[in-house]
């Protein structure tokens, strides 16, 4: 019985990593659709988002069942509690990828991102994707040193968001639609980074038992 229980806990971790992989693919495809004007790819990202939602529902159901059936304590309890929060963050990351794809679809056949911002948006996407990959490693290995690096690297995403926002504010060569789309897009990518930070902080709670600072900008992520 104990071996089966431990196997169930390991499967929860595997499910979280699988969700992270699904979100990573969605992020890569959404950015490609956005920058290349690939309508078909945008549609696939949007259509795939409910599957990420379903994975969250399934994972949370397993977690609640283990909580009810096993009455876990100590580290096992923290794992189950953290799992519920991490699955929620991953589901929101999937939603944000779908939002990027929706901008790409709405702008088609035009490109939503002006030429002067394409490299910056690609960089924001790359940073968010790297943060998500590192977060998956942190979830698997409980690597708190890497978790700290994810938090540190998130500052670069924040800086890029602010840089683009300043350039939009100064520029005169944007349509109203471009201003709205760019403002939304940089917010989406910045929020992806925040959710990655939230993931690694939940692992910190799992390992140390220290409460997550819910007043911290990068862990108390609003619904967006």
Image (spheres, helix red, strand yellow):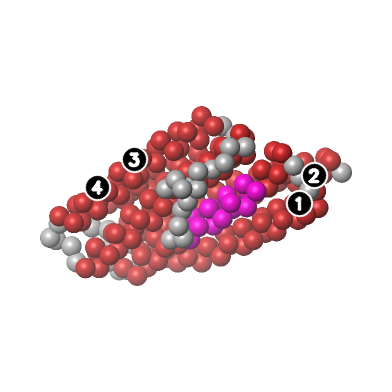
Q: Marks 3 and 4, how far apart in space?
A: 10 Å
Span of residues in magenta: 81-95
The answer to whether residue 107 is above or below residue 169 is below
Circle 1 sits in a helix, a strand or a loop, which is it? helix
The answer to whether the residue labelled 2 contacts the one labelled 4, judged by CB atoms less than 8 Å apart, is no
Label 1 packing within 10 angstroms: few (<14), some (14-19), many (20+): some
Q: Position of residue 152 (x, y in %)?
A: 41, 35
Circle 4 sits in a helix, a strand or a loop, which is it? helix
Q: Marks 2 and 1, how far apart in space?
A: 8 Å
Question: Which residue is under mark 2?
Answer: 5
Position of residue 130 in the picture relative to residue 139 (left or right): left
Q: Which mark's residue is nearer the viewer, 2 or 1?
A: 1
Question: Which residue is under mark 3?
Answer: 156
Position of residue 208 in the picture relative to residue 49 (left or right): right
Which numbered disc, 2 or 1, marks the residue that appears first in the sequence? Answer: 2
Q: Position of residue 29 (x, y in %)?
A: 44, 55
Q: Marks 3 and 2, how far apart in space?
A: 41 Å
At 78% across and 48% down in the image, what residue appears?
71
- Residue 132 visible in the shown view: no
Question: Which residue is under mark 1?
Answer: 66
């Amino acid at each position: 019985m104990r071996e089966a229980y431990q196997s169930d806990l390991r499967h929860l971790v595997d499910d979280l990593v699988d969700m992270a992989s699904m979100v990573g693919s969605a992020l890569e495809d959404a950015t490609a659709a956005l920058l290349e004007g690939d309508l078909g790819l945008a549609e696939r990202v949007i259509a795939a988002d409910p599957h990420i939602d379903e994975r969250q529902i399934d994972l949370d159901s397993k977690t609640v069942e283990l909580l009810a059936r096993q009455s876990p304590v100590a580290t096992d309890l923290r794992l189950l509690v953290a799992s519920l929060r991490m699955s929620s963050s991953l589901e929101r990351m999937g939603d944000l990828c779908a939002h990027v794809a929706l901008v790409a679809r709405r702008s088609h056949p035009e490109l939503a991102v002006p030429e002067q911002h394409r490299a910056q948006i690609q960089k924001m996407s790359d940073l968010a994707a790297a943060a998500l990959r590192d977060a998956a490693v942190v979830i698997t290995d409980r690597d708190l040193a890497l978790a700290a690096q994810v938090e540190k690297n998130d500052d670069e995403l924040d800086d890029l968001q602010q840089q683009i926002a300043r350039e939009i504010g100064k520029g005169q060569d944007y349509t109203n639609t471009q201003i709205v789309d760019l403002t939304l897009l940089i917010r989406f990518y910045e929020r992806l980074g925040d959710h990655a930070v939230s993931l690694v902080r939940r692992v910190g709670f799992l390992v140390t038992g220290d409460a997550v600072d819910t007043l911290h900008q990068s862990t108390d992520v609003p619904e967006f």
